[in-house]
Amino acid sequence: MPKVICHLPNFDDEVSGVKFVPHPDGGKISEEISEEQAELFASIPGYELAEPVKAPPKGKDKGKPAPAADATPPAGTEGEGGEVF
């Protein structure tokens, strides 16, 4: 569910039944609210939608980059003809 941030000075801790708390970057951030409420608040100057926190990628690679195709194989893994074992 979305949240909104308010950057207005002298802002109260509750507006239209929605509670707000101080945001680390300044202003105040709302509790989770419905999409409709978030769109309504975001249409008011001084309010903006808070960016959702992105979850880390799922899967066994854990977001690590793939090894380069031309990577040098570890020492001792090459055969006589240059084959890689």
Image (cartoon, rainbow, N blue to C red):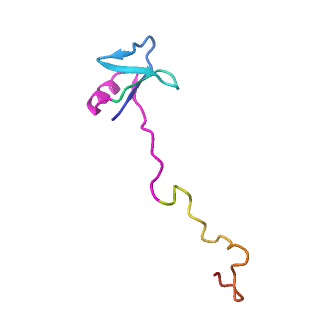
**Does 49 appear in magenta?**
yes
- Count of numbered tags: 0
With respect to residue 68, does 43 lie above or below? above
At x 56% / y 63%, what residue is drawn? 66
Residue at 45 percent of width and 45 percent of height: 55
Q: Looking at the picture, does residue 5 appear above or below residue 64?
A: above
> Does residue 81 sit above or below 74 in this rendering?
below
* Residue 52 location (% of width, % of height): 42, 38
Q: Which quadrant does the N terminus fall into? A: top left
Magenta stretch bounds: 33-59
Specify the quadrant that holds the C terminus: bottom right
- The residue depicted at 59 percent of the width and 65 percent of the height is 67
Q: Residue furthest top?
A: 10
Left/right placement of residue 32 relative to residue 24 reads left
Residue 39: percent from the left, percent from the top?
30, 30
**Residue drawn at the location 35% of the way across and 16% of the way down:** 14
Residue 10 falls within the magenta-colored stretch: no
Q: Residue furthest left?
A: 36
Give coordinates of residue 68: x percent, y percent.
61, 67
Where residue 11 sits, quadrant-wise, is top left
Which residue is nearer to you in this view: 27 or 60?
A: 60
Nearest the camera: 85 or 51?
Answer: 85
For residue 68, side relative to residue 45 (left or right): right
